[in-house]
Image: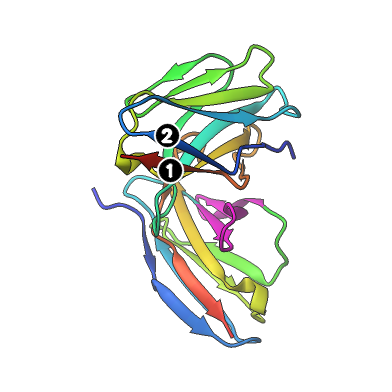
Amino acid sequence: DAKTTQPNSMESNEEEPVHLPCNHSTISGTDYIHWYRQLPSQGPEYVIHGLTSNVNNRMASLAIAEDRKSSTLILHRATLRDAAVYYCILRDGSNYQLIWGAGTKLIIKP
Amino acid sequence: ETGVTQSPTHLIKTRGQQVTLRCSSQSGHNTVSWYQQALGQGPQFIFQYYREEENGRGNFPPRFSGLQFPNYSSELNVNALELDDSALYLCASSPYGGSDEQFFGPGTRLTVL
């Protein structure tokens, strides 16, 4: 199974953009890139996903490298409520399984 | 629209016992996935059920089993509990085989003594 590598933690200031990196050098052509986040004492929450092209939604943007070996989740204007563990996940396109890493703990400073 | 619910919220068992965890999927969702999340780690995929059939399984032994019912709710059963089974068990539902967004419940915290 292809794996992802993320920094253990990151800090950012409130109301500034946040760029969360993810490396997935062994990604296969059928793997989708998903991002979920988990707030303290809650189940994970879907953020965004993509295959090859950059994606935008109301929560975030996903920038995917041309070779697909890395991606970046962009929160355009972080708030204190965005403090969570962010998981970059590869989904096997043939069986819908999500393979999770350890995630990045995002700390937002007021 | 009711979200994904799980019961119980907390559970304490002793080694060797059996446990059943329950999950009600979100309305209109026919796919349920179960995950185990140890403290400080990301969730690990256990298995997925689609229209009452197992539709993929992670690296978990056969003592982890499941069921999905006609109303798409689901159970996770764990036999012969071990200390390492202590974890947060998460259920996620999704429409149409789980291809895109999965909706997670709050989880059941299982402690094995």
Name the residue nearer the viewer: B60 or A109. A109
Magenta portion: prevailing SS class: strand
Expressed as whole percent of the image width and height from the top left, the position of residue B2 reads: 26, 52
In reply to whether residue B50 is colored magenta, the answer given is: yes
Q: Which residue bears the numbered disc 2? A: A12
Q: Residue at x 34, y 32 (%)?
A: A78
Q: Residue at x 59, y 28 (%)?
A: A32
Task: State which chain disc 2 sits on.
Answer: A
Crowding at mark 1 (Cα within 10 Å: few <14, some 14-19, many 20+): some
Q: Residue at x 56, y 63 (%)?
A: B39
Counting residues from the N terminus, which is met first, the one under dot 1 or under dot 2?
A: 2
Mark 1 lies on a secondary structure that is strand
- Let me know if residue B30 appears in the view: no
Expressed as whole percent of the image width and height from the top left, the position of residue A37 reads: 45, 43
Q: Judge left or right: residue A24 versus residue A34.
A: right
Mark 2 is on which residue type?
Answer: Ser
In reply to whether residue A64 is colored magenta, the answer given is: no
Mark carried by residue A107:
1
Crowding at mark 2 (Cα within 10 Å: few <14, some 14-19, many 20+): some
Task: State which chain disc 1 sits on.
Answer: A
Is there one chain holding both mark 1 and mark 2? Answer: yes
Locate the C terminus of chain B by quadrant. Answer: bottom right
Mark 2 lies on a secondary structure that is strand
Q: Which residues are magenta?
A: B33-57
Q: Is residue A76 above or below residue B84?
A: above
Name the residue nearer the viewer: B96 or A107. A107
Expressed as whole percent of the image width and height from the top left, the position of residue A76 reads: 36, 23
Q: Residue at x 33, y 26 (%)?
A: A77
Q: CA distance from mark 1 to mark 2?
A: 6 Å
